[in-house]
Image: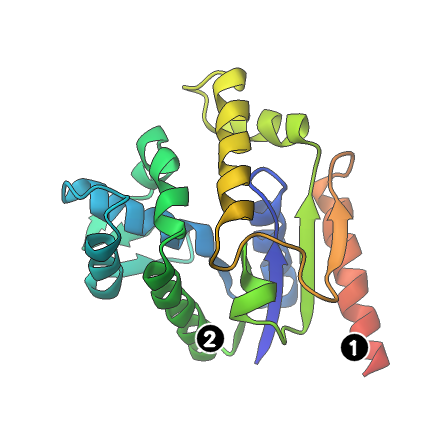
Amino acid sequence: MRVIAIDGPAGSGKSTVARALAERIGLRYLDTGAMYRAVAFAALRRGVDPADEPLVAEIARTFELSLHTDGTVFVDTVDATIEIRGPEVTRAVSTVAANSIVREEMRERQRRFAAKHHGAVMEGRDIGTVVFPDAELKVYLDAAPDVRAARRSKEVTDLSYETVAADLARRDALDQGRSDSPLVVADGALVIDTTGLTVEQIIEHVANALEAGSTAS
């Protein structure tokens, strides 16, 4: 089973790079951040406070989640593709992701996904450190905060750059400071600063590292 783990903060380029790399090397792509967003969406839709750990944990255990190759996300048979990227879910997702039982459930779903598809290019915040510490290649993408905010503000056109930048800073603090699997660089990870790089250049860096690893083995 081939697993390529790509971690890093929001706006570092993880999703774009992971999706393109998966297509290039013939593996399925999994956006694990979408999974945590789906839990947050399910909680909000049911009127559950994202900070209510027991209730949110129960939702994570029991809700139906379908992630499709075209990027659509269904939560309990409802198409939530757009809603999970909205501001309400974005504000709630770090709180949901800090819930240890939610993380445990999502990790198991992620491992089942990789086993079912004989591997995956998987991106998130704890893939190389916790979910697949023995991944064939571990990558950590990062970029300057202003660059990450500019990238993300292009995706969420209904919010100002200042609002997006403040939200990214808040999420960075929560993701890096949580007690359960905080966002850190995995041992042995290839660290790439994507600030001044194109997507194609980043993919070449990763592909070259994969090739070097295959040659070495």
In this view, the residue in front, 108 or 53, is 53
Mark 1 crowdedness (10 Å alpha carbons): few <14, some 14-19, many ≥20: few
| Secondary structure beneath label 1 | helix
In this view, the residue in front, 54 or 195, is 54
Residue 210 coordinates in the image, percent (x, y): 75, 68
The quadrant the C terminus occupies is bottom right
- From mark 2 to mark 1, how far is it between C-alphas? 21 Å
- Residues at marks 2 and 1 touching, judged by CB atoms closer than 8 Å: no
Compared with residue 208, is residue 19 higher up or lower down, i.e. above or below? above
User: Which of the two discs, 2 and 1, labels the residue nearer the N terminus?
Assistant: 2
Give the quarter of the image for residue 209.
Answer: bottom right
Mark 2 crowdedness (10 Å alpha carbons): few <14, some 14-19, many ≥20: few
- Label disc, if present, on residue 117 of the rendered structure: 2
In this view, the residue in front, 166 or 15, is 166
Side of 214 where 141 appears, left or right: left
Residue 203 coordinates in the image, percent (x, y): 72, 52
Q: Which residue is mark 1?
A: 214
Q: Can you name the residue that lies furthest to the left here?
A: 46
Name the residue located 51 percent from the left edge and 69 percent from the top edge: 131
Residue 139 coordinates in the image, percent (x, y): 69, 58
The image shows a total of numbered marks equal to 2
Q: Amino acid at mark 1?
A: Ser
Give the quarter of the image for residue 67.
Answer: bottom left
- Label disc, if present, on residue 108 of the rendered structure: none
